Image: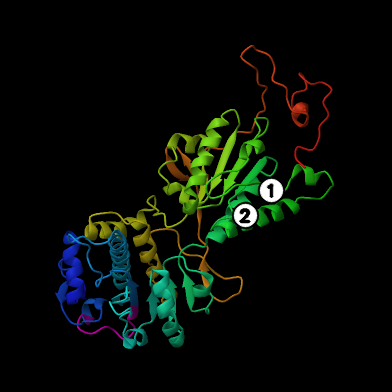
């Protein structure tokens, strides 16, 4: 139901990936070599195969294929180039499936695919006509390549959809810019509001690393404290709904976290640091294992789910909860047809890169033609202007909990039972003294205890 035209360069890429070659991936597609600059992928209706319809959505896609990258001695590609090509192909296959879905509902799409990696002279091979003729630009994925092409995109005021996280200077350029990757600041705020609502009287401790995710840590603390202050109507409320307790660690350690944990109330430990703080997460896991007498719930950055050293049994014991995005909604049967099309194309089900690219193009098609009943694979994008109202950000997040050795939405997880304090005894069966501030919880052992503020 369409036409695919490949360049000689892209044919070389196809040879490198063997079974992932373009030619013949679906029955009925026609292939021919037409251009030295880009791959033209036309997904159009049956009555307009030779010439796109006037209302065809023209999509310029910039992905890191690295066609001009030299191989290492022995004929192998650098590891980074190989991984970038894998991501590029996954993203491209997601875009292709989205284009076919839009074409099925009468929205023809032309994908103009170019290599974002500069050639040997350091120049990104992007013809001006490619930009002029496009309705929207997807990519580049790599930060350094975005910096090169964005002045040309801004000059033409083309809609620019970014599929990877980019710095502030690349985003706040105007309302034609859309960050498709869900905002991590939004995730930190969602998590803080949830913790403040569910655990406002528990011992909530934030591990502050001060590393690359310091902005997330500050935003979590500000949101949590604001939610707590909103509950202060009497003088006693400030003690009952305490502000956030923080422990200062680093990207490699959790500091004096052990001093902030207690077995006499529920401990809610929060970490907003991501992959750059793997050592901290390893240390935190060890610290919590050593404090096995304490009741602990763990809320974390979404990237903790991808760290293999965190044991599943511990994740379930601590009821690990974190925000996730680009999660395919397998439970929704309306997604199955599109997911099957991707599997028929690649032999695999889509990963996060393919899912994000697919949903970004579906979202663009919806905004251009709201009447089309197209379906994203994951949760639909939720666009909100940035604080400076200088760009659009995707704020869609799903909060998941690890339960029964699988990630589940919170509404399908079992309720967390109320915390019940208990006394501890030595091996000689003698009572371990309870700190003064918690003695009121045990009137039989401490009949004269007076209730004090649980935390300053």
In three-dimensional space, the C-alpha distance between marks 1 and 2, rounded to whole angstroms, equals 9 Å
Mark 1 vs 2: CB contact within 8 A: yes
Picture coordinates of residue 234, whole percent (x, y) = 84, 48
From the image, give the main secondary structure of the stretch colored magenta: loop
Q: The magenta stretch spans which residues? A: 48-59
Residue at figure coordinates x 57%, y 49% from the top left:
250
Residue toward you, 416 or 101: 416
Q: In which quadrant will I find the C terminus?
A: top right
Residue toward you, 276 or 221: 276
Residue 46 appears anywhere in the view: yes
Residue 113 found in image quarter: bottom left
Left or right, 330 with respect to 190, comes to: left
Residue 375 appears anywhere in the view: no
Q: Which mark is residue 244?
A: 1
Left or right, 100 with respect to 265, comes to: left
Residue 75 found in image quarter: bottom left
Residue on which the image places disc 2? 220
Picture coordinates of residue 453, whole percent (x, y) = 79, 38
User: Residue 40 magenta-drawn?
Assistant: no
Residue at figure coordinates x 25%, y 56% from the top left:
343
Residue toward you, 434 or 41: 434
Residue 57 to residue 64: above or below: below
């Amino acid at each position: 139901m369409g036409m695919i035209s490949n360049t000689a360069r892209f044919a070389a890429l196809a040879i490198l990936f063997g079974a992932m070659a373009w030619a013949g991936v679906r029955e009925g597609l026609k292939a021919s070599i037409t251009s030295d600059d880009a791959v033209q992928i036309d997904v159009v209706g049956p009555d307009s195969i030779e010439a796109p319809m006037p209302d065809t959505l023209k999509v310029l896609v910039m992905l890191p294929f690295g066609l001009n990258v030299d191989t290492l001695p022995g004929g192998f590609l650098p590891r980074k180039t190989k991984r970038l090509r894998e991501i590029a192909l996954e993203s491209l296959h997601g875009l292709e499936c989205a284009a076919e879905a839009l074409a099925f509902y009468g929205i023809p799409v032309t994908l103009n695919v170019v290599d974002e990696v500069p050639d040997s002279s350091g120049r990104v091979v992007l013809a001006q006509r490619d930009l002029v003729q496009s309705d929207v630009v997807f990519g580049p994925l790599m930060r350094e390549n975005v910096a090169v092409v964005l002045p040309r995109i801004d000059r033409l005021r083309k809609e620019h959809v970014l599929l990877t996280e980019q710095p502030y200077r690349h985003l706040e350029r105007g309302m034609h810019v859309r960050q498709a990757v869900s905002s991590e600041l939004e995730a930190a705020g969602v998590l803080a509001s949830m913790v403040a609502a569910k655990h406002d009287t528990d011992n909530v401790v934030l591990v502050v690393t001060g590393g690359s995710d310091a902005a997330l840590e500050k935003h979590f603390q500000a949101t949590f404290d604001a939610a707590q202050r909103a509950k202060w109507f009497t003088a006693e409320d400030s003690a009952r709904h305490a502000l956030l307790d923080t422990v200062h660690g680093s990207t490699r350690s959790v500091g004096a976290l052990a001093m902030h944990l207690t077995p006499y109330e529920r401990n809610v430990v929060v970490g907003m640091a991501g992959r750059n703080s793997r050592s901290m997460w390893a240390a935190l896991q060890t610290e919590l294992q050593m404090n096995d007498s304490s009741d602990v719930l763990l809320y974390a950055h979404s990237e903790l789910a991808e760290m293999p050293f965190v044991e599943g049994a511990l994740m379930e014991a601590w009821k690990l909860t974190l925000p996730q995005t680009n999660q395919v909604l397998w439970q929704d049967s309306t997604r199955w047809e599109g997911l099957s099309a991707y599997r028929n194309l690649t032999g695999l089900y889509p990963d996060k890169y393919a899912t994000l690219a697919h949903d970004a193009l579906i979202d663009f098609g919806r905004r251009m033609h709201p009447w089309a009943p197209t379906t994203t694979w994951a949760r639909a994008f939720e666009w909100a202007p940035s604080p400076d109202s200088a760009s659009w950000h995707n704020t869609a997040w799903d909060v998941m909990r690890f339960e029964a050795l699988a990630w589940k939405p919170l509404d399908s997880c079992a309720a967390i039972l109320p915390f019940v304090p208990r006394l501890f005894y030595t091996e000689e069966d003698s009572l371990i003294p309870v700190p003064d501030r918690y003695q009121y919880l045990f009137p039989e052992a401490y009949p004269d205890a007076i209730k004090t503020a649980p935390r300053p």
